[in-house]
Image: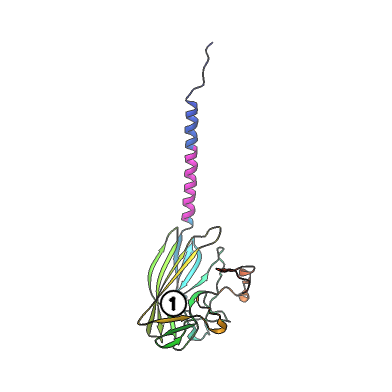
Amino acid sequence: MMTVEPSKSMPRIYAVLLAVVLTVAALFLLLAKIGRNLASGMSFSWESEPSALTVLESERKVLSYVYGDRLPAGVDPRYARSSYIHPLHALDGRVLTEDFPRDHLHHHGLFWAWPVVEVRGVTTSNWEPAEPPLRQLFARWVRQEADRGEARLVVENAWTLGGAEVVVQETVTIVARPATPQGRAIDIEIVLRPVGGPITLRGTPADNKGYGGLCFRGLAADSGNGSVFKGAAMTADTGPLAED
């Protein structure tokens, strides 16, 4: 009687089949990841009223940079403003910021301004209307780049004193990255270069509050969507903040 031994090639066949299955699975995962990345690509769109450049992710709005003057109907022309971010959107598309709120017409979404500016021997402000007036005005686009990894825009503004003399060249870089389960990272860099002489920036002296610089005006409770910040917490470098 002849005994037939199992073929020694069978383990090799199983190993090859396993390798093929794993390779196909890895390929499907890679294609799925590429598809997700393509679907979540960053892009730009232009808005005309007011003049703004909007950052999008998968056609969903992330933020708009307002570079043209905006002034709501019935508001004193001295409050006309540009060079700020509004609206800023949550991951679900809801608007997080407010512009020209009734209680503080000088608040504009995510903006940067200083209550006390000393330049050319005078004290003025680009925080609120002042005399002589000091405005941040659009000068030119430096860069606009968007891909799957980020949207980057760089803009140059001019601080104009009295409607004529440029006293500061301002370069703003905004980098918005794709959303993650934890949130979205947005980096903002502001570079100020004095033109024709020194400049001094100070926070508000009232009650030693000192606020100024980069500021965020969140949507107010009476705006019709007061639940946006309900239960929200804010954390500074010193830890959680208990007060408003």
- Span colored in magenta: 21-38
The crowding category of the residue bearing disc 1, from other C-alpha atoms within 10 Å (few below 14, some 14 to 19, many at least 20), is some
From the viewer's perspective, tell me whether residue 113 is left or right of residue 236.
left
**Total label count?**
1
Percent x, y of residue 105: 54, 82
Q: Quadrant of the N terminus?
A: top right
Say which of 166 and 37 sits in front: 166
Kindly give the residue lying farthest to the top in the view shown. Answer: 1
Percent x, y of residue 28: 49, 45
Q: Residue at x 48, y 43 (%)?
A: 26
Q: Secondary structure at mark 1?
A: loop
Q: Is residue 114 magenta?
A: no
Q: Quadrant of residue 169?
A: bottom left
Say which of 47 and 139 sits in front: 139
Q: Residue at x 46, y 51 (%)?
A: 34
Identified by mark 1, the residue type is Gly
Per the image, the residue denoted by label 1 is 68
Dominant secondary structure (helix, strand or loop) of the stretch shown in magenta: helix
From the viewer's perspective, tell me whether residue 221 is left or right of residue 109.
right
Q: Quadrant of the C terminus?
A: bottom right
Q: Residue at x 43, y 79 (%)?
A: 136
Q: Quadrant of residue 181?
A: bottom right
When the figure is inspected, residue 181 is found, relative to residue 69, above or below; the finding is above
Q: Residue at x 49, y 60 (%)?
A: 178
Which color mode does the image show?
rainbow
Q: Quadrant of residue 152?
A: bottom left
Percent x, y of residue 204: 52, 82
Kindly give the residue lying farthest to the left in the view shown. Answer: 196
When the figure is inspected, residue 236 is found, relative to residue 27, above or below; the finding is below
Say which of 200 and 76 sits in front: 200
Percent x, y of residue 19: 47, 36
